[in-house]
Image (spheres, grey):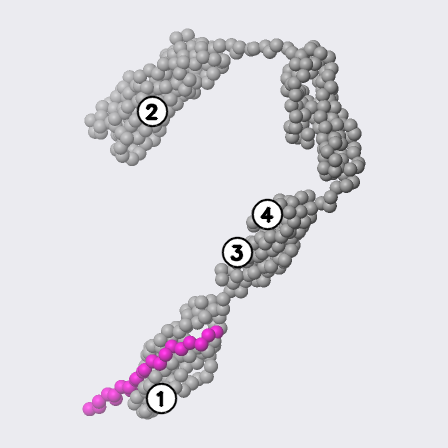
Amino acid sequence: MKSSPLARKAAAFGASATVLAGMVAALVASPAQAATPAAAPAAGKAALAAAATATKAPKVSISTPKASTGDYEGSCPVNVTVSSRIKVTVDGKTTLAYRWLHGDGSKGKIKTVKLKGHGAKYVKVSEKLKFEENVKGWEAVQVLGPRKAVSKKGYFSVSCQKPIVIEEEQGPEVSARVWASPSRYVGTCATSSDKVDFTGVIRVSDPAWVRYRWVLNGRVVDYGKTKVYDTKRVGFGISPRESQSGYAQLEILGPGRESSNRAYYKVLCEDEAPATRVSATNLVTATNNDGCKVGAHATVSSTGRARVEYTWWVNGKAVDSGYEYFSAGGSRTVSLDDRVLSGDATKGGKITLTVSGAGSHDSITQSYAACQAPKPTVSVSAVSQTGQRNDMCADKRGPGVDFKATLTSTGPTTVKYYWLVNGQKDGGDLTREVNGSTDVTWGVGGTHSATETKGNIELVVVSPNSVSSGNAAFSAVCPKPAATS
């Protein structure tokens, strides 16, 4: 196959016998891999035989390579990508080694891919070729390990063709120029007579039919077609009912594409009715402490027909928008649904409503209050007896008894509480800082008889809310003295 690009590719991708032998020897070093016997030295062949005896090589299959362009016809140079897919049945770890075989007899560099796992593994391989002239050829994939295999040949062709240049027939030269008359109008606008006329002159180098259109302030307002022998005037006029300014332009649609200069104009209507005004009033904000949210509502008004657009802002950030259409003057109520506050916004801030329409705008701002988190509440567990002290039994004061209860709060707070023993406050008021759950303890002793302490005990919380543990009965008896001989 004659192909100078493929010949150059052979020089770039060809591998020497020494390099190939080294790659094959490396593949044989793994028990799960096989080398190419023709390229391996004697020692490599011995290793290959031993490996084949010890471990069965994985199965390998290769799809027929396909070219991205198939049979290509067109301008050159052209890039052609040839792709194939190699299937390897893996049981553990192995290394896939392959290279591309070219139709001109050259071979590509050996490439390797490490595989692991169990079952079929698919490896997509591709080769990029560039051709600058006609060529017919093929590409194939040669697998060197873990098992030797060669794909079928994938054929392709490239037919380079010079681009066809179609010369357009040269048409007549066309140009245009426009002006406004008058360019500035001051007076009544109540009548329908034209206030501003626009005149354009179309000039051609040879007689031709000319298609054109008028553009007013970027919007197409008129189309036309006329036969022009040398020059010809075309035009249109406007009758504004309100003050305005802008420009007109004449665009040539054919032959060719040309645009005239812009003719600027200005109209001032002395009898113009008062402009429609829009406004925002009666802004009311509301802070919802349940979930720390804020909402608002306000009144949007217009003195005439208008589409009034509005935007809600919370602390300088736009959070919602909409519009109200007024066919005549009137007022509407617009609302901002509750928005969850976070960070510094929970400490209070400002809500703003901006409105715009009919060439006017307005805004109103109102502060909103900080959201107040609900006050923490406290609950108390039942009192339990945790121990007995007998140190007072020797001097006939009776045993001591220790108690425990758990205070649990919904948030950080100071808890004020006291203990009741047999209906009497024992020890006075106490305080404890609580955030979550905290155990509190108390001890009673020597209050009844020389050998027994009994009764009931209760823990009473005074603030931040009133709650009690309820009475818990207790009884403790001094141990009897040990008998003496």
Kind of residue at disc 2: Arg
Q: What kind of element bears circle 4?
A: strand
Residue 401 placed where, x, y %? 34, 82
Q: CA separation, marks 3 and 2?
A: 59 Å
Is the stretch drawn in magenta largely helix, strand or loop? loop
Relative image position of residue 355 (x, y in whole percent): 64, 49
The residue pinned by badge 3 equals 338
Disc 4: CA contacts within 10 A as few (<14), some (14-19) or many (>=20) = some
Q: Which mark is residue 85?
A: 2
Residue at numbered disc 1: 446
| Foreground: disc 3 or disc 2 | 3
Q: Quadrant of residue 456?
A: bottom left
* Tag in front: 1 or 4: 4
Circle nearer the viewer, 1 or 3: 3
Residue 254: x and y in percent read 64, 17
Residue 348 visible in the snapshot: no
Name the quadrant containing residue 359.
top right
In whole angstroms, how far apart are the C-alphas of marks 1 and 3?
62 Å
Distance between the alpha carbons at the discs numbered 4 and 3:
20 Å
Q: Above or below — where is 399 with respect to 89?
A: below
Identify the residue position indicated by label 4 in the image: 324
Magenta residue check for 475: yes
Q: Nearer the viewer, mark 4 or mark 3?
A: 4
In-image side of 13 versus 253 (left or right): left
Residue located 26% across and 32% down the image: 119
- Work out whether mark 3 precedes mark 2 in sequence or the reverse, and give the earlier one: 2
